[in-house]
């Protein structure tokens, strides 16, 4: 477990797979409506209070963002104003990476350039409006690198699952997992 301060209102905790096993929880189970998640969050906040030597009250308002990485997960805590509302929220990172390519040659150039490092992605290509939209579902830990590569060839779109659903409804599916093999 690694606890790092970003600023006086924000800190994060990196948990390895082993840490998560010790806490008896998995990434998929992290949901604040789950009593086990609450137990884990309160335990982590106590660890952060001791490590950072700060007065962190689990009853205070805060935003909790959870993202999966290759060897566990990152949990970022942003403390809110001390207004006494006592609400805790968890926000998970979207699994999608969406991009818009103006022409087919740019899409092909992206796939050709990035094929070796992106082999573990699920992909869907749609004819959308005047170009091509790509929806990638990368394995944990690859999303940031993919985003940087895509930005050289296309416009990066919102990572929203709502956008991906809208695209499936209004776009024309051209290809699924033919450029990259699906993740195992």
Image: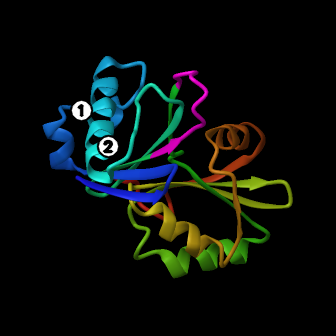
Q: Nearer the viewer, residue 179 or 59?
A: 59
Q: Is residue 27 left or right of residue 167?
A: left
Above or below, 112 against 174 in this view is: below
Above or below, 88 against 19 in this view is: above
Q: Nearer the viewer, residue 65 or 179?
A: 65
Query: Badge 2 is on which residue?
Result: 49
Q: Main secondary structure of the magenta part?
A: loop
Query: Badge 1 is on which residue?
Result: 25
Q: Nearer the viewer, residue 161 or 29?
A: 29
Identity of the residue drawn at 52% across and 22% down: 86
Q: Quadrant of residue 98?
A: bottom right
Q: Residues within 10 Å of mark 2 (few under 14, many from 20)?
A: some
| 79 within the magenta span | yes
| 149 within the magenta span | no
Colour mapping used in the image: rainbow
First along the sequence among labels 1 and 2: 1
Instruction: Choose mark 1 or mark 2, whichever is in front.
Output: 2
Identity of the residue drawn at 66% across and 71% down: 107
Q: CA distance from mark 1 to mark 2?
A: 21 Å
Q: Quadrant of residue 55?
A: top left
Identity of the residue drawn at 32% across and 18% down: 35
Question: Which percent across, then down, holds residue 25?
Answer: 24, 32
Image mark for residue 123: none
Q: Which residues are magenta?
A: 77-87
């Amino acid at each position: 477990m690694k606890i790092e301060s970003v600023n006086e209102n924000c800190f994060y905790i990196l948990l390895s797979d082993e840490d998560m096993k010790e806490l008896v929880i998995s990434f998929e189970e992290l949901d604040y409506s789950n009593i086990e998640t609450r137990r884990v969050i309160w335990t982590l906040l106590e660890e952060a209070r001791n490590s950072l030597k700060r007065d962190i009250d689990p009853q205070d308002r805060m935003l909790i963002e959870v993202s999966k990485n290759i060897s566990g997960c990152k949990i970022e805590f942003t403390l809110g104003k001390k207004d006494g509302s006592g609400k805790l929220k968890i926000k998970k990172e979207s699994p999608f990476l969406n991009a818009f390519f103006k022409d087919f040659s740019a899409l092909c150039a992206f796939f050709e350039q990035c094929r070796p490092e992106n082999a573990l992605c699920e992909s869907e290509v749609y004819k959308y409006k005047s170009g091509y939209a790509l929806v990638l579902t990368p394995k944990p830990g690859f999303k940031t690198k993919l985003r940087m590569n895509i930005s050289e060839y296309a416009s990066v779109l919102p990572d929203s699952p709502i956008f991906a659903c809208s695209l499936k409804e209004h776009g024309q599916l051209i290809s699924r997992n033919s450029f990259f093999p699906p993740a195992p």
